[in-house]
Amino acid sequence: MIFNIEVNQKTIKARRGDTILETLRRNGITVPTLCNMETFTPTGACRICVVEIEGRNDLVPSCSYPVEEWMKIYTHSPRVIHARKTIVELLLSSHPDDCLYCIRNGNCELQDLAEQMGIRERRLPMVKTFIKQDPSSASVVRDPAKCVLCGRCVRFCKERIGISTFDFIGKGMTTLVGPTFNNQLNVSNCITCGQCIMVCPTGALHEKDNISQVQHALQDPEKYTVVQVSPTVSVSLAEEFNVKPGRELDGLLVATLRKIGFRKVFKTAFGADMMVLQIVDELMQRIENNTLLPMFSSDCPAFVKYMEEYHHDLLDHLSTSKSPQQITGNLIKHHFARQQKIKAENIHSVSLMPCTAKKFEAQREENTHRGITDVDTVLTTRELARLIRLYGLDIQQVTPELPDSPFAIRSSAGKIVGASGGVAEAVYRTLYFKITGKQMVNFKVTALRGNKAIKEVQARIGSTKIGFAAVNGLANAFDLIKKIKAGRDDLHFIEVMACPGSCISGGGQPFTKNAEAIKARMKTLYDIDEKESIKVAHKNPSVIDLLDKYQGREYESFRENFKTTFRPREVLR
Amino acid sequence: MSTIKNILLNYPTPDRSLLLPILQDVQCSEGYIPADAVVLISDYLKIPTSKVYSVSAFYEKFRFTPGAKYAICLCNGTACHMEKSGSLIKEFEKQLGISAGQITRDKLFSLSTTPCMGACGKAPVVKINNEFHTGVTIGQVAELLNTIKNREEK
C-alpha cells in the first residue's frame, strides 16, 4: 500500500512495510549510515541514521523503524545533526588517531563520516585502547583497536557466508569482535574469503599486505621476478583509478607491470584453461565409473577450506585439480624454469588475484615441493593498485602490450571463470566436445549465467544427461550439500564460489558500494567471451602445444603436477 | 566431558533458547565453562561456537578458567568500607600474595570484592565459598586462612 508522508516539509510517497531509511533512499534523501547494510536485517547498532519525528520525544533510528502514515520526519534538523555528530565524536574518542598510517586512509567510512559531520576538534578525551593486531592468518589481519563494533562482518559472515567466525565478545567499553575464545584467526574456522574486509567500514579488518615482499624481489638482482594476472583483476582494477567500472585493462596492465620491473607477465587464464581440461577428464572418468558424483569444483580456496572443516565425508568429491593460480604457478616454477634454464629457487613468482583466500592457498603445504613454493607472493587487486601508485605510474598513459609466452594465450572460457557459473560453463563447453566429438553451435549456456544464488541446468549431451549447478555465496550451498548427503543424485558437476557474486566481487577487489560496478565487471567478462574466436579451453593453441611436448609416461607425470590433495581440518566450528 | 553430556540429556529437544540454562548448569557443576563444553553445546544446539562463546562472555557469572577451591569474596560496600574493609583487602592480598581478582598458584584461594552482600549491620563481611564471616578484623585474617590450610593438609 502506498501512502504519503511528510519529510522536511515536503510530501513524499511511502510503501507500507518499508523502513524509514528505505523510503528516504527511494526518494533521493540521503541519511548517513554506518552499521546498515542493504538487504540485511537491520540492527540499529550505531544510531548514525537517527531522524526526528514530530510528536516524539526521542530520535528514532531510521534503518530499523517502519514508516507510518502519520509521520512528519526531519532528517537534518539541528537536533538530529547534533546527535549524529556526537555519536561520531564518541566513536572517535576510542579510535586510534593514526589515519595517516592506516591501510584504509582515503577510503574509510569513519573518516568520511567525521568529514561529513565537520568534526574539526577533539571535544571528548581520548580513551586509548591497547589491543594487539592479529596477523596470524595468511589472508586477513584483525586490528580490534580500530573496530567500531558496527557488526557488519559478524552479520555478513553469518548470513551470506554461513561460517560465523566472528561474534561480539564481552560488553561495555571492553567489547571486541573476534573468533571463538578470542583465538587467533589462523586456528579459527575462518575460510579467508575476505568478505568481512569488504564490509568493514574502517581498517579493523584488512588484507595482509605483501607489497614489500614483491619490492624486495624486484630489487634483488639474483631473483627473476615474474607475475601472473587473474582474469578478474583486469576488469576491476579500473575502478581504483577512477576509470569507468568494467573497463578491461588487459594490455595496459601488462605494460604497467613491465614498467614496474616484472621480467615476464603471464595470464592465469591459461591455467584456468588447463584446469578445465583437468576437470573434464576427471569428470568423464567419474561419470563412466559412476563414482564420487557429484563432483565439486575446487578452484575456490575458501570453499575448499570450508569442505575441509565441515564435510570430511565429501572431500573425495572435490575435483583433484589445482586452481588456475597454482597450475600456472607450478608451470612457471617447473616447465618455464627448465625451458629458460633458470633455477626454480631463483624465480620469484607473484600472482595478482581478486581474492584474499588465494594468499592462504599459495602457502598450503600441498603447493610446496622440496622447499619451492609454486607461488611466492599473492597480491590482491587493492594491493596491486597501491603498487602501481607507489611506482608513480599512470595506467592510462601506457601503450598496451601483449603478455609473454608460453602462458600468454587463453580461450575466453578461461576468462569467464571469474563470473559465477563461469567454471561450470567452461566445463560444459569442453565436456560437450569430449562426449559428442562436435563443437557446440551456440556456446552460451544462459541458464548458468547471472547473479542468482543457485543456478542449475540439466543438459542432454550426446546420449547422457548431465546436471550442472553453480552456487555463489557459501551460505547458499548448505542446502544443496544437505540434499546431496540425503541422496540427491541428478547433479554431476557443482561449482561453488564462496563470495556472493563470485570472484568479480571477491575479498580482494576494490571497495565499492555500487552494485552496478559489479554488474559492469561481469558484463565485460561475457562481452569478451562474445567477441573472441577461441571459446573453449581445449582449443587453446598454447595449451595444446604444451601438452604435445610430453608423450607417454612423461605426459602422465606432467599431468600429475596439476593435481592436489585435501585433508580434514579440525577447528572450532 | 561426561558430566556435560549428562547435562545435555536433561534437555531432550535442542533449541537455541536453551543456551543460557545449559550454560548455567555447566557453570554450576564444573565451576567454569570448559572449552569442550562450548563445542559440545554448539554441536547440540546447532549454534556456532563463536555465538556460544559470545553469549557466555557477556555474563560476568560465567568464567572460562577453573576457579579456586576456596573463593574469598570481600564486601566493599559503603558500610563495610566505613568499617575499614579497604585495609582488610590489603591484609588478604599481603597474606595470599595476590591482588583482588587473582587466584593463588596452588589454585587454593581466589580473592575478589563485591559491592554489597546485604549484611551491612555486621560489617565488614567476608564470604568464603558459601560461608559468611561477619565483623572480621585484620587480626582474624591469618586465623581464617590457617584453619583452611590446616584442613587441606590433612
Image: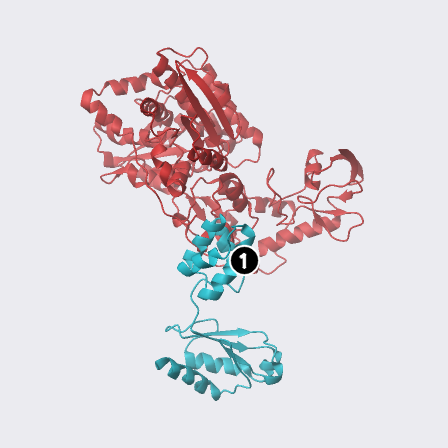
Determine whether, in the image, residue A378 is placed left or right of residue A65.
left
Image mark 1: chain: B
Residue under the image location 39 percent in, 33 percent down = A352
Q: Can residue A95 be seen in this view?
A: no
x and y, in percent, of residue A258 in the image: 36, 28
x and y, in percent, of residue A240 in the image: 50, 33
x and y, in percent, of residue A337 in the image: 24, 29
Quadrant including the C terminus of chain B? bottom left
Q: Which of B71 and A539 is in front in this view?
A: B71
Q: Estimate how packed mark 1 is, as few (under 14), some (14 to 19) or many (20 or more) residues with alpha carbons within 10 Å.
A: few
Quadrant including the N terminus of chain B? bottom left
| SS label for mark 1 | helix
Determine whether, in the image, residue A39 is placed left or right of residue A545.
right
x and y, in percent, of residue A290 in the image: 34, 25
Colour chain B appears in: cyan
Q: Nearer the viewer, residue A530 or A166?
A: A166
Colour chain A appears in: red
Counting the numbered discs, the total is 1
Residue under the image location 80 percent in, 47 percent down = A54
- Which residue bears the numbered disc 1? B20
Q: Which residue lies furthest to the left in this view?
A: A553
Q: Is residue A131 above or below residue A450?
A: below
Q: What residue type is labelled 1?
A: Leu
Q: Residue furthest bottom?
A: B139
Residue under the image location 48 percent in, 48 percent down = B48
